[in-house]
Amino acid sequence: MLKVWGRRNSLNVQKVMWLVGELDLPHEHIAAGGDFGKLDTPAYLAMNPHGRIPVIEDEGRSVWESHAILRYIAARYGRDRFWSDDAWQRSNYERWMDWSATALQPTFLNDVFWAFYRTPETERDWTIIHRGVEQSAKHFELLDRWLQGKAYMLGDSLSLADITTGALLFRYYGIDIPRPSLPNVEAWYERLKARPAYREHVMVAFDDLFGKR
């Protein structure tokens, strides 16, 4: 059985669990990271030498890094829905996966969610926060233009592009920051919230992280 290691309120774990849920894969979730610990044990470091979450185990083999895990699960278990052997078709979602990992997520997660939500008020650096909020808005405005006329990021069906990018929306709309009008993103978010796997694995309360580095 597939095993998924990580804490449920971790964004990167949520991406993996969301795909597992969409595919209805039998799995075992093992709480790790944060207050659950385990990441510095020899057994865990043998699976991931970086000591980070998420990690999956599948038939005795481990895979780490959330987007690598998504590719692995999609290629092995979701070829009819989430994977293509055609390099061009695959590039359509992989481009957005990489954009999410290198542009959107670092800007929002580091300079807004961490710098604002997870930092005690007396320690916040508002220069970083304001810059992060402004740049995050620009990223989401780009996404809003892209989503014009689309149900999901690549058309009518959910893809890995949606999973890597859409997982951030629960946090983006769940904290008290200014946001631009994003009608296409908001409509997309409503469609995601209607999906049972999104509600179960992404819409996980994160208030215990407030002010907690």
Image: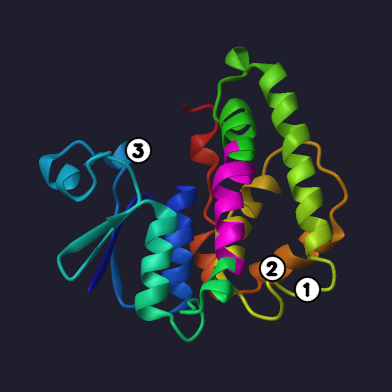
Q: Earlier in the sequence, mark 3 or mark 1?
A: 3
Residue beneath label 2, please? 153
Using the rendered image of the protein, determine whether residue 53 is visible from the camera's viewpoint: yes
Residue 96 located within the stretch drawn in magenta: yes
Secondary structure category for the residue under label 3: helix
Name the residue furthest left.
42
Give percent across and percent down for residue 103.
Answer: 62, 43
Element assignment for label 2: loop
Label 1, on which residue?
Answer: 150
Quarter holding residue 55? bottom left
Q: Quadrant of residue 158?
A: bottom right
Amino acid tagged 3? Gly
Provide the residue span drawn in magenta. Answer: 92-106
Taking the image as shown, residue 48 lies to the left or right of residue 87, namely left
Secondary element type, mark 1: loop
Give the residue displayed 54% in from the left and 30% down from the top: 118
Q: Marks 3/2: CA distance?
A: 32 Å
Residue 22: x and y, percent?
49, 76
Circle 3 is placed at which residue position?
34
Q: Position of residue 56 (x, y in %)?
A: 28, 60
- Residue ranking furthest to the front: 87
Looking at the picture, how far across and down is residue 126, in whole percent? 70, 18
Q: Residues within 10 Å of mark 2 (few under 14, many from 20)?
A: many
Whether the residues at callouts 3 and 2 have beta carbons within 8 Å, the answer is: no
- Marks 3 and 1, how far apart in space? 37 Å
Cβ–Cβ under 8 Å for marks 1 and 2: yes
Most common secondary structure along the magenta stretch: helix
Most foreground residue, 103 or 28 = 103
